[in-house]
Amino acid sequence: MKIEKDFMARIAAAAAAETLPRFRMSGLVSDNKRAVGFDPVTEADRAAEQAIRALIRETYPDHGIVGEEFGVENADSRHVWVIDPIDGTRSFICGIPLWGTLVGLLEGGEAVAGLMSQPFTGELFHADADGAWYEGPGGARRLAVRQTTDLAQATLFTTAPAMFAGSARVAYDRLEGAVRLARYSADCYAFAMLAAGNADLVLETGLNSYDIVALVPIVERAGGVITTLDGGPAEKAGDIVAAATPALHRAALDLLNG
């Protein structure tokens, strides 16, 4: 289906109206969603998701919605919007602008459109069937990956090596040892930087659908490759490998699964 031309921008603006006033706000309370460990959520997460849901319901009332904070509605619809109101809440509560609002659209289970909005820096990364684009400082432009094919020349992003355990940590260390540069804790920004041609590889583990659906079309329409660790559709979430080129993706998978 064809989305309204300005709908992604309207979603980004609705979310920003809730997140920006609370970013670096003194006294912002973060609750922990886990019994063990720390998985923060704030009133900014909840308010942004409610605003996005309201806009989707108003514009596409027959569509389904899956959100991190408020769950599922009308999930049997062919068209389902998948929302992470603040991807990178840990960065958000620390005042670091490596967070973003993620909204993706599934059509028959396939990610066909998505956005990553970072309102503090004034950046919007979005994609649909026609391509992937950047809007922000320096002007609008089409997104395109860089043509890195050699692991030895690649820049790799992951949240943290400590996210991997056992044999998965051994495999991750093997990959990090093969690349030129590894950087950590960028969350959704890492995938955006791959699509923008500033990075080459992203490896993440244990992702949920709302962490990745919006980013799949952004990476793919920019010319990149994104799958699960076993080469399946990234929409299934879990362990995700994204790469700038097919050759680099294949080399990363071979090393990780070796």
Image (cartoon, rainbow, N blue to C red):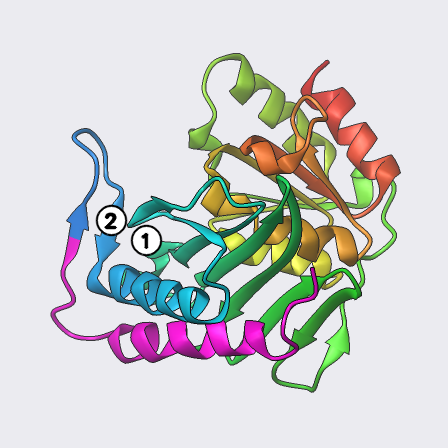
Q: What segment carries the magenta color?
A: 1-30
Q: Within 10 Å of the Cα at label 1, are there few (<14), some (14-19), or many (20+) other Cα atoms?
A: some
Q: Name which residue lies at 71% across and 58% down.
A: 195
Whether residue 112 is visible here, answered yes or no, is yes
**Amino acid type shown at disc 2:** Pro
**Amino acid type shown at disc 1:** Arg
Q: Would residue 116 appear left or right of 156 to someone viewing this image?
A: left
Residue 186 image offset from top left, x and y in percent: 50, 54
Q: Quadrant of the C terminus?
A: top right
Residue 53 image offset from top left, x and y in percent: 37, 62
Q: Would residue 110 appear left or right of 34 to someone viewing this image?
A: right
Say if mark 1 contacts mark 2, CB within 8 Å: yes
Residue 10 image offset from top left, x and y in percent: 50, 78
Q: Nearer the viewer, residue 5 or 83?
A: 5
Q: Nearer the viewer, mark 1 or mark 2?
A: 2
Q: Name which residue lies at 65% across and 60% down.
A: 193
Q: Reply above or below: 147 against 121.
A: above
Element on which disc 2 rests:
strand
Q: Name which residue lies at 43% across and 31% down.
A: 163
Q: Which residue is mark 2?
A: 40
